[in-house]
Amino acid sequence: MKKILVVEDDPVILEAVVYNLEAEGYKVDTASDGTDGLEAARKLRPDIVLLDIMLPNMSGLDVCRLLKDELDQPIILMTARDAEIDVLNGFDCGADDYITKPFSMRLMRARVSALLRRSTKPETELLAAHEDSAAYRADQKTEGSNVAPIIKTDRIELDTIAHEIKLDGHLLEVRPREFELLEFFMRHPRQALSRELLLESVWGYEFRGDTRTVDVHIRWLRKKIEANPATPTRIITVRSIGYKFMP
């Protein structure tokens, strides 16, 4: 049974969300302010956090930022604000998706289901990866192979089995989506890739956010792999199209 934490201070919205999630078979816990929500997430380790932005004691954006830094839990923001700056602030804090109030319960359930599919690997897949990793490395570590588990450039090494990225031999701390984005870039070097293609390939067709989340994740990656993020040489902006990775 998947666990969901709902952090919302409006009792009417909270009751409706909990009722609909429990009807779908989820185990639901709740909190009504930011401080309690943060502590509940740390203690319960839910599969998804549904998080209101405007909360007493601590804002949802601050809670989101702390949870992403500490636990990297999937988070859907619930907000009455739909201005571009508010959406970008949410993505800057690490949110995976957002819903603008007022929202339908059907839409909310669809967003939860889609995020769970993106963030959860089947147990059999994890087991197979663990058991076959040694053989897979030996058989597939072929230079230029699209299925190679280890991809290298002159200074970057990305290991899809260990789920690690190293720059000049030093391990980088990256979010799961940053890892997947860089992997897609490294498997398609020197190709101009549109934001729409990146969304479909990395986030999945079910993702309901917009292309601005790509820009936010690119900015995060540049801070980690570029000598000067203000003048990037690895992830290049292609005007009117998107981005290109230059090894």
Image (tube, rainbow, N blue to C red):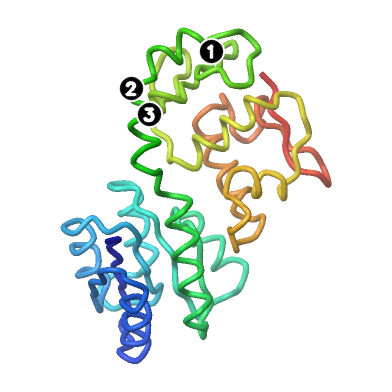
Tag nearer the camera, 3 or 1: 3
Left or right placement of residue 39 versus residue 91 in this view: left
Say which element carries label 1: helix
Say which element carries label 3: helix
Quarter where residue 8 is shown: bottom left
What amino acid does circle 3 point to? Ala
Task: Name, please, the residue furthest toward the left.
Answer: 43
Q: Are marks 2 and 3 in contact (CB under 8 Å)?
A: yes
The quadrant of the rendering that contains the N terminus is bottom left
Q: Residue at x 57, y 27 (%)?
A: 226
The quadrant of the rendering that contains the C terminus is top right
Q: Which mark is residue 56?
A: none
What amino acid does circle 1 point to? Gln
Q: Which residue has dot 1 on it?
A: 140
For disc 3, the neighbor class at 10 Å (few under 14, some 14 to 19, many from 20) is few
Q: Which mark is residue 131?
A: 2
Task: Name, please, the residue furthest toward the right.
Answer: 240
For disc 1, the neighbor class at 10 Å (few under 14, some 14 to 19, many from 20) is some
Q: Is residue 19 above or below residue 186?
A: below
Q: Earlier in the sequence, mark 1 or mark 2?
A: 2
Give the number of marks. 3
Tag nearer the camera, 1 or 2: 2
Q: Which residue has dot 3 on it?
A: 128
Disc 1 from disc 2: Cα separation: 15 Å
Disc 3 from disc 1: Cα separation: 15 Å
For disc 2, the neighbor class at 10 Å (few under 14, some 14 to 19, many from 20) is few
What amino acid does circle 2 point to? Glu
Q: Residue at x 50, y 81 (%)?
A: 80
Location of residue 152 in the rendering, given as x and y in whole percent from the top left corner = 56, 14
